[in-house]
Every structure is written in C-alpha cells, then in structure tokens.
C-alpha cells in the first residue's frame, strides 16, 4: 500500500509543480535546464523507493505510475476541460510579424527565443519573415513562415 | 484537445480566457511555493528556529529536541539532568518509544526495565554534576508523537510531529 501511495503523492506533486512553473520552465532550453531535470529525477527516486530495493516495489511503482498516466489520458479524451488543466493550451505569441507583448511577458518568452526557433527549424533571419509563432503545450516554440518563402 | 478555433489562417486550440486564468493561478501557486520554502528555512519541516526546542522542569531536567521530524531521518534527543546519586533513572513513556526506533543511547544504560506504561533506563553517574544523555533515534511512524521523560520526580512532556 505504501508504495502505491508514494507513487500517487509524487505523481500529483510533480504534475502540479511542473504545471504551475509554466510551459517554458522545463522546455530544456539550456544545458542547465537539462541538468536540473536530472537532479529532480534523482530527488524523486529517493522519495519513491525509500530504502526498499525489492523488485516487487519497483514493479508496483512502475504499474502505479503507468496506471495513473493511462487513467488520466483516458479521462482527458472524455473531458476537454480536464485536458486543458492538465496539459495547458498553445498560445499564439507572434502574429504576422508582430510580437504580442503581454503574452510573451506572461509566458516568460522573449524575442530571442522566437528568433532561435525560427533559425533552428526554418533558417529564418528576421521576425518579419514569420507569420505565426506559437508557444506549444510542451514549451517549445513552433514557427510558421510567411507564404512564398518556403515554397 | 480543446476546442479548435481560427486565429487568422491558423487552426489552433488556443483559449485565451483559459490561458489568462492559468497565468493568474500560476502567480498564486508561486507565492504559495515561496511560502513553503520560507517555512522550510524557518524550520517548519525540521532543523530550524521553529523546530529546535529545549523543554525543562525546574532546572533539574531539561530536554533538547526537534519538534518537527521527517520519517526515516536520523534524530537526536538530548537530556540534561542533575544527578543525585551514583545511579540516575530516566523513565520514558512506552507509547513514545514505540514510535521511535532507538539506534543508540550514550552513555549506555546499565539496566533497562519496563513497567506498565514506562521504560526505565538506569545510568551510572558521578553524583553532583550535571550529566548529559543522548538518544539517537529514527521515527518509525508518521504523525504526531507525544511522550514524557521523567527523572526523579521531575517530568518533561515532549511533542513531536513526524512528516511522511
């Protein structure tokens, strides 16, 4: 019972913390973000298994975590509202070359982040070459170039 | 997937109303998170000014301990007492001991006995001087633990909370 409760507590806590930290926090923008994610994983591991290194506990943990994840995804298919709360929604942060400042600020994204994404995926050089930039659920930025440029 | 709407020529499940609510909630959650960290620094989750305490009974007995403990962590309870004779008997309530896994007692008691409700530890001491007894333990149950320590009539209540 202990193992299952531990898994539930950790799952919920991580879900809430990662969700409220914003889309951008865990998007692994820098190497340090990646290292931070590893450290969080390490800290979580201790709390999950404690001092019980049995195979039974390990299997129970995996079953519980995968189970919660599946149950939530099933519920999400039925309820778009729940889906929004768990996964968030994408936000348009640039429209027709024009930055939507208040959304950028609230999402903690700036011009250089958009330009980075534009360079990496489409080889674009300037903001005015971008039609839309969208901050996706995952924290990544997707870029839609202006028509005629990619053709 | 939420409701797909059109933004210009883009089909996207953007929901600005929801997004604003989310941003507001984020701010509240950050404040809450900061509060938790501040409390932790203060000692609400163990080892800090809010947690470390010293309880006494008339100068003859004092007990230093942490109010807030975490399950499975190592802890120490320090007992200081004035010894009246060559032997000092310390009584610890059994209910309290049942919640702790005792790892070490320094100095080692010469004799341990149990009577209903109490565990009695007897130590050899040099009379007159103040002596210090250390109890190292690990909480073995979560939740509030209340106990009493008694030395020659003077008794000190101990209250601890063990976080999961």
Image (cartoon, grey):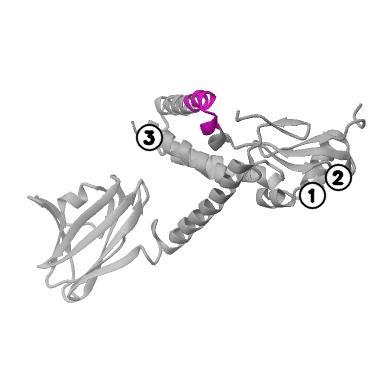
* Circles 3 and 1: CB atoms closer than 8 Å: no
| Residue A144 visible here | yes
Q: Quadrant of the C terminus of chain B?
A: top left
Find residue B155 and name its label: none
Mark 2 belongs to chain: A
The residue carrying pointer 2 sits among few (fewer than 14), some (14 to 19) or many (20 or more) residues within 10 Å by Cα, namely many
In the drawing, what numbered circle is on residue A5?
A: 3
Separation (CA) of disc 1 from disc 2:
8 Å
In the figure, B96 relative to A34: above or below? below
Tell me whether the residue at label 1 lies in contact with that at label 2, contact meaning CB atoms closer than 8 angstroms: yes
Disc 2: which residue:
A127
Estimate the x, y position of residue B133 in percent, counting from the top left: 25, 63
Q: Quadrant of the N terminus of chain B?
A: top right
Quick check: do tags 3 and 1 share a chain? yes
Q: Earlier in the sequence, mark 3 or mark 1?
A: 3
Figure quadrant of residue B6:
top right
* Residue ID at (78%, 31%): B9
Question: Residue B28: horizontal and vertical position, in percent?
Answer: 52, 53
Crowd around label 3: few <14 · some 14–19 · many ≥20 (10 Å) = few
Letter of the chain that mark 1 sits on in the rendering: A
Of the two numbered discs 3 and 1 in the rendering, the one whose residue sits closer to the viewer: 1
Q: How many angstroms separate mark 3 from mark 1 (CA)?
A: 43 Å
Which range of residues does the magenta coloring cover?
A: A71-83
């Amino acid at each position: 019972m202990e193992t299952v409760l531990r898994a539930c507590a950790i799952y919920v806590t991580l879900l809430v913390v990662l969700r409220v930290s914003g889309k951008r926090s865990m998007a692994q923008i820098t190497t340090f973000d990646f290292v931070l994610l590893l450290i969080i994983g390490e800290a979580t591991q201790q709390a999950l298994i404690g001092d019980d290194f049995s195979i039974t506990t390990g299997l129970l943990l995996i079953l519980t975590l995968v189970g919660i994840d599946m149950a939530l995804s099933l519920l999400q298919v039925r309820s778009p509202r729940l889906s929004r709360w768990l996964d968030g929604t994408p936000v348009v942060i640039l429209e027709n070359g024009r930055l939507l400042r208040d959304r950028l600020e609230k999402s903690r994204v700036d011009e250089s982040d958009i330009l980075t994404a534009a360079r990496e995926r489409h080889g674009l050089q300037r903001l005015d070459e971008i039609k839309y930039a969208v901050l996706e659920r995952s924290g990544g930025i997707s870029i839609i170039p202006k028509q005629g440029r990619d053709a | 997937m939420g409701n797909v709407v059109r933004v210009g020529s883009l089909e996207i499940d953007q929901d600005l109303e929801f997004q604003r609510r989310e941003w507001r909630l984020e701010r509240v959650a950050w404040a809450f998170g900061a509060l938790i960290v501040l409390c932790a620094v203060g000692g609400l989750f163990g080892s800090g000014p809010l947690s470390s305490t010293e309880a006494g009974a008339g100068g003859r007995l004092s007990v230093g301990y942490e109010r807030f403990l975490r399950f499975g962590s190592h802890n120490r309870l320090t007992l200081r007492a004035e010894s009246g004779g060559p032997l000092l008997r310390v009584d610890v309530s059994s209910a309290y001991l049942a919640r702790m896994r005792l790892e070490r007692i320094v100095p080692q008691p010469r004799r341990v006995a149990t009577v209903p409700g109490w565990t009695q530890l007897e130590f050899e001491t040099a009379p007159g001087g103040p002596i210090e007894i250390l109890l190292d333990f690990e909480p073995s149950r979560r939740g509030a633990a209340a106990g009493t320590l008694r030395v020659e009539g003077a008794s000190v209540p101990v209250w601890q909370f063990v976080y999961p």
